Image (tube, helix red, strand yellow):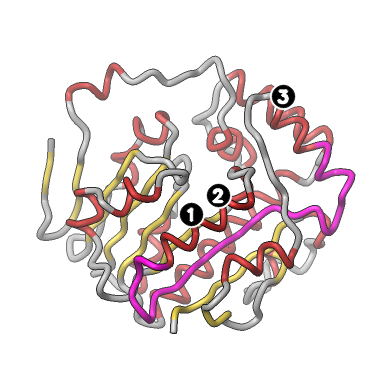
Amino acid sequence: MQDETAGGTVDTRNDEDDEIDLQLHRAHSARMYDYYLGGTTNFAADREAAGQAIAVFPSARVAARANRAFVHRSTSALAQAGIAQFLDIGTGIPTSPNLHEVAQAANPRARVLYTDNDPIVFAHARALLLSSPEGLTTYLQADITDPTTILSSEELARTIDVTAPVALSLNALLHFVPSDQAAYRIVEQLKNALAPGSALVISHGTPDFGPAEAERITQVYAAAGTTVRMRTREQIERFFDGWDLLDPGVCPTHRWRPDGAEQEITEAQVSAYAAVAVKR
């Protein structure tokens, strides 16, 4: 167990890590997303489910890559604006450049706490812990549906100062919280724990640009054991209530401050909204 809280990395794993049940027989959304991105940390069940999703939504790979590009642009923008702490919930399989690499490119002293519930992500956590010497990255195995555990964790306490601004990233995550009541409650609890000047970053699947395709992909995920709840723009905007949306507001992922690489992508291909808001 490695603990370098002065800077660099914090490896919170222990001798029990090798005994984690990786559940390779079941498809997992994080590993399906890795497959869409062209990664190699996915298994037969994940590839089968992802293939079925691609069959009904052929632009799934385009959507995943547009979402990842949004993560990079929003992280870079917030780091350049002076935010030096990032809480990334729903981290996913490490695919460089990871969020901490983008943040620390703008501010080498940036501190990042990654959180995910996939045991495969946990098994690859060291790839997420290659921090700059001046900064710090930490990993916490936890679930978005239990924000109290995240907020009260030792990992958060030694990585993030919640009395100072924090960028909270919930990218491609909340559509895996099927209950609207639970999703809004979770986000409000996390928002309330953060200081003024903090930022909320969300990307979220929507049926607005292709209702039939959204319904079919929802059925594919359900068959693989994962409930998905696509939401409309109005429903997604509600997550940002009480905070100030940064320009251009809630928009398709590839339209949030594009850098020119997204010109050929359509709204129907991404079928997702994204936005960043700041706490007053």
Q: Which mark is residue 186?
A: 1
- Is 206 included in the stretch rendered in magenta? yes
In the image, residue 190 sits, relative to residue 53, either above or below, namely below
Q: Quarter-wise, where is residue 99 in the image?
A: bottom left
Residue at image location 17% in from the left, 23% down from the top: 15
Q: In the image, which residues are magenta?
A: 192-216
Q: Which mark is residue 238?
A: none
Place of residue 92 in the rendered image (x, y in percent of width and height, measured from the top left): 48, 43
Dots 1 and 2: beta carbons under 8 Å?
Answer: yes
Q: Label 1 vs label 2: CA separation?
A: 6 Å
Which residue is outermost to the right? 212
Q: Amino acid at mark 2?
A: Ala
Q: Amino acid at mark 1?
A: Ile
Q: Is residue 269 left or right of residue 84?
A: right
As rendered, which of 127 and 243 lies closer to the eye? 243
Q: Which residue is mark 3?
A: 223
Regarding mark 1 in the picture, which secondary structure is present there?
A: helix
Q: Is residue 146 left or right of residue 241?
A: left
Q: Which mark is residue 182?
A: 2
